[in-house]
Image (cartoon, grey):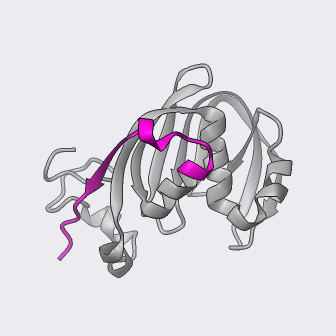
């Protein structure tokens, strides 16, 4: 990222977060956060497991029951969505945060976008060949831990600390 562009959306910014993206986040909490630019190859099933851990760490075994088939994925309105050749909602349920998780059946996933509830972590997975893809975006320390817990080899990812210019 070049100086003067938003780390979240890539638009021009006075610091490194544009006014629009800054208005969507808790600035005081963001000032205390350590953010990382992350990029690297990640398997689709590993990224799916990262999402499941991120949305329901304390209830992961229950959540995995809903998504035990290869072509079932979670979507949460405004936070987690996928782009695929075809997709349909086959069920939904509520998680502890009160959010509704849709169970989506999808064929040939091209991209998955994940935003944390705080919107401090924003990661995209894009397919490059079958279930192999490139993950890129901005992650918090907590998100890096969830990536590790999902079985992603974080040593193989390119991870750079982002210095925030918040006044």
In x, y percent, where is residue 111? 54, 34
Q: Is residue 162 magenta?
A: yes
The number of discs equals 0
* Residue that sits furthest to the bottom in the current view: 28
Q: x and y percent of residue 36 in the render? A: 34, 54
Residue at (30%, 75%) from the top-left corner?
31
Kindly indicate the quadrant of the structure image that contains residue 20: bottom left
Q: Nearer the viewer, residue 44 or 161?
A: 161
Query: Residue at 20% of width from left, 51% of height from top?
Result: 5
- Residue 90 spot, x, y in % from top left: 84, 44
Nearer to us in this view, 51 or 98: 51
The answer to whether 14 appears left or right of 105 in the picture is: left
The furthest residue to the front: 155
Of 40 and 122, the residue lying toward us? 40
Query: Does any portion of residue 76 appear in the rendered image?
Result: no
Q: Dividing the image into 4 quarters, which one contains the C terminus?
A: bottom left
User: Going by the image, does 72 lie left or right of 149?
Assistant: right
- In the picture, the quarter occupied by the N terminus is top left
**Residue 46 visible, this angle:** yes
Quadrant of the image occupied by residue 69: top right
Q: Which residues are magenta?
A: 148-167
Residue 5 lies left or right of residue 151; in this view the side is left
Residue plotted at (52% across, 57% down): 145
Q: Is residue 119 magenta?
A: no
Q: Residue furthest top?
A: 129
Provide residue 97's location: percent of width, then percent of height: 68, 73
Kindly identify the residue that appears in the image at 42 percent across and 55 percent down: 139
């Amino acid at each position: 990222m070049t100086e003067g562009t938003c780390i979240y959306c890539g638009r021009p910014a006075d610091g490194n977060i544009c006014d629009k993206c800054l208005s969507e986040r808790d600035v005081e909490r963001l000032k205390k956060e350590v953010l990382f630019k992350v990029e690297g190859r990640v398997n689709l099933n590993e990224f799916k497991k990262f999402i499941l851990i991120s949305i329901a760490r304390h209830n992961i075994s229950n959540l995995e029951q809903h998504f035990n088939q290869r072509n079932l994925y979670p979507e949460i309105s405004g936070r987690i969505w996928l782009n695929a050749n075809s997709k349909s909602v086959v069920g939904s349920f509520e998680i502890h945060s009160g959010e509704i998780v849709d169970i989506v059946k999808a064929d040939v996933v091209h991209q998955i976008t994940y935003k944390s509830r705080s919107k401090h972590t924003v990661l995209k997975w894009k397919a490059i060949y079958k279930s192999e893809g490139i993950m890129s975006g901005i992650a918090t320390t907590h998100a890096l831990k969830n990536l590790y817990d999902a079985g992603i080899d974080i040593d193989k990812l390119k991870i750079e600390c982002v210095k925030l210019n918040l006044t």
